[in-house]
């Protein structure tokens, strides 16, 4: 069971404490794992690039709540929210809160945690939305928004994994209804 998140966590305020950088071999910290680097250790040019990426990243803005979302769940490191272009009812995106472009640039630990956090979410999506296949599909496409996101898609059929089926006509009431159903079984 996933616990309720805590937005009062001061370690994840608007400061940018540690970043996984989508480049390798830069600065004095190059020999360390990317998730261990802080912006203080990077060349100022790279810091500027990182700040630019984060400022212009829609998912970072969702994390910072400068852009609203239908939030499903969060903890200190991860956030899950409903996709605004769902391929199926309850289509959820699970993201690490720290900006990283490519899923396989995550540290082993962060990647493992991401998958483990998806497990109770997928169970809740299955319980709440009762997909015909009895399964929640998982997709890491890495396109669209350049911030790691796992698609969790309750599947009535395999076609639901097709991004060309994304809907743009979903009304707020439908999002709210699905969110309520998911939260009822998640917490
Ligand atoms: Zn981002």
Image (cartoon, grey):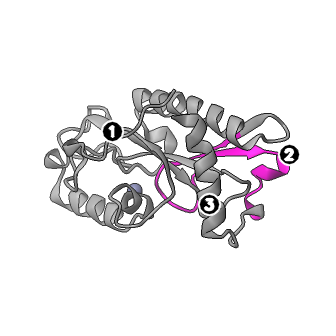
Rendered image quadrant of residue 87: bottom right
- Left or right of residue 67: residue 49: left
Ligand 1 within 8 Å of disc 1? The answer is no
State yes or no: discs 2 and 1 in contact (Cβ < 8 Å).
no
Work out whether residue 156 or residue 151 is closer to the camera in this orientation and state it. 156
Query: Does 4 appear above or below 91?
Result: above
Residue 134 place in picture, x, y as percent: 80, 34
Query: Does 26 appear above or below 187?
Result: below
Of discs 1 and 3, which sits in the foreground?
3
Residue to which mark 3 is pinned = 175
Q: Which residues are magenta?
A: 137-164
Residue to which mark 2 is pinned = 157
Work out whether residue 13 or residue 174 is closer to the camera in this orientation and state it. 174
Q: Earlier in the sequence, mark 2 or mark 1?
A: 1
Label 2, label 1: how far apart the Cα atoms are: 33 Å
Q: Residues within 10 Å of mark 1 (few under 14, many from 20)?
A: some
Query: Does 136 appear above or below 169?
Result: above
**Residue drawn where x is 69% and y is 46% of the image:** 153
Residue 115 place in picture, x, y as percent: 54, 31
Residue 1 shows in the view: yes
Secondary structure under badge 1? loop
Ligand 1 within 8 Å of disc 3? The answer is no
Point out the quarter of the image occupied by ligand 1. Answer: bottom left
Q: Earlier in the sequence, mark 3 or mark 2?
A: 2
Label 1, label 3: how far apart the Cα atoms are: 24 Å
Mark linked to residue 76: 1
Whether the magenta-drawn stretch holds residue 3 is answered as no
């Amino acid at each position: 069971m996933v616990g309720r998140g805590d937005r009062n966590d001061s370690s994840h305020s608007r400061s940018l404490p540690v970043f996984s950088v989508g480049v390798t071999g830069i600065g004095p910290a190059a020999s360390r794992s990317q998730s261990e680097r802080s912006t203080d250790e990077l060349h100022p040019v790279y810091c500027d690039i990182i700040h630019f990426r984060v400022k212009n990243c829609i998912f970072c803005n969702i994390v910072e709540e400068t852009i609203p979302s239908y939030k499903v769940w969060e903890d200190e490191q991860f956030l899950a929210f409903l996709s605004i272009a769902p391929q199926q009812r309850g289509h959820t995106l699970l993201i690490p809160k720290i900006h990283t472009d490519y899923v396989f640039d995550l540290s082993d630990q962060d990647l493992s945690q991401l998958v483990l956090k998806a497990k109770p979410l997928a169970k809740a999506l299955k319980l709440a939305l009762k997909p015909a296949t009895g399964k929640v599909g998982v997709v890491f496409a890495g396109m669209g928004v350049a911030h790691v996101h796992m698609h969790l898609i309750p599947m009535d059929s395999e076609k639901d994994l097709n991004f060309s089926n994304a809907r743009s006509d979903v009304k707020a009431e439908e999002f709210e209804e699905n969110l309520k159903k998911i939260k009822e079984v998640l917490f």
